Image (cartoon, coloured by chain):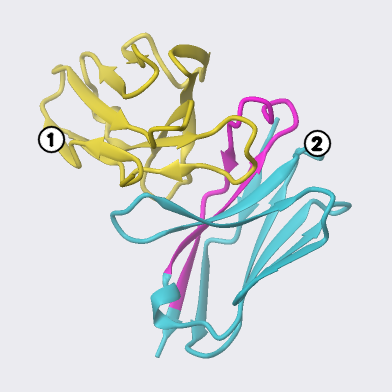
Amino acid sequence: DTGVSQDPRHKITKRGQNVTFRCDPISEHNRLYWYRQTLGQGPEFLTYFQNEAQLEKSRLLSDRFSAERPKGSFSTLEIQRTEQGDSAMYLCASSLVGTAGGYTFGSGTRLTVV
Amino acid sequence: GEDVEQSLFLSVREGDSSVINCTYTDSSSTYLYWYKQEPGAGLQLLTYIFSNMDMKQDQRLTVLLNKKDKHLSLRIADTQTGDSAIYFCAESGGQSSNTGKLIFGQGTTLQVKP
């Protein structure tokens, strides 16, 4: 297993465009998390899945954001009508429920909205 | 609400010990974590401590937890230039401990001078 993979690593988009990011978690992990990190800040929770069910969404996740994990494996995070304030690093992490050892994070997707 | 605070910057000389401090607000936190982030990368779990422990040692890393004062520290012995990075403290709040959601501090930048 190569860990948590995120694609793309970098994305530059024009304001108003839609973007989609993909996350492939560690295969045996049943929980998948999305976080957003802006410059000089720690990661902020956006949403998480247990298997294919989306169990919690942060109020940071406006209705322009949608996340899916259709078969309980990979996940996508889509941002519609991007705004400059969406520029950030989007981090995905996975874990196995019942284990205490924290998450494994991916390397992130850096989004720049111009 | 849940909040985690860290000092922003620490500079040490190679070979010295580094101590990074963190305070948190949620007294029901079950686990507390330390993550390391190198430039352009995701977060790497360094260590974690269960809330009923006072101390945990793992090679060059020592974690101290003062639950009464809600204070967590990370000591790095014999700090090396490769330890230069941003260090994040995180708590799994009591209400969110079943979700695995983490609340992160804003990170402490550790600069190691040769």
Q: Which quarter of the rendered picture does the C terminus of chain A lie within?
A: top left
Q: Colour of chain A?
A: yellow
Q: Mark 2 lies on which chain?
A: B
Residue B96 part of the magenta-drawn span: yes
Q: Give the range drawn in magenta.
A: B85-111
Dot 1 amino acid type: Ile
Question: Where A76 sits versus A91, above or below?
Answer: above
Of B4 and B49, the residue lying toward us: B49
In percent of width and height, residue B53 lies at 82, 56
In percent of width and height, residue A36 lies at 40, 34
The residue at 56%/86% (across/down) is: B78
The residue at 24%/29% (across/down) is: A84
Q: Quadrant for residue A111, please give it.
A: top left
Mark 1 residue crowding within 10 angstroms, few (<14) / some (14–19) / many (20+):
few
Q: Which chain carries label 1?
A: A
Figure chain in cyan? B
- Between circles 2 and 1, the one closer to the viewer is 2
Q: Quadrant for residue B34, please give it.
A: bottom right
Question: Where A31 sits versus A107, above or below?
Answer: above
Mark 2 residue crowding within 10 angstroms, few (<14) / some (14–19) / many (20+):
some
Instruction: Give the residue at the far right of this rendering.
Output: B68
Q: Label for residue B28?
A: 2
In percent of width and height, residue B5 lies at 63, 50
Q: Which residue is labeled 1 in the image?
A: A12
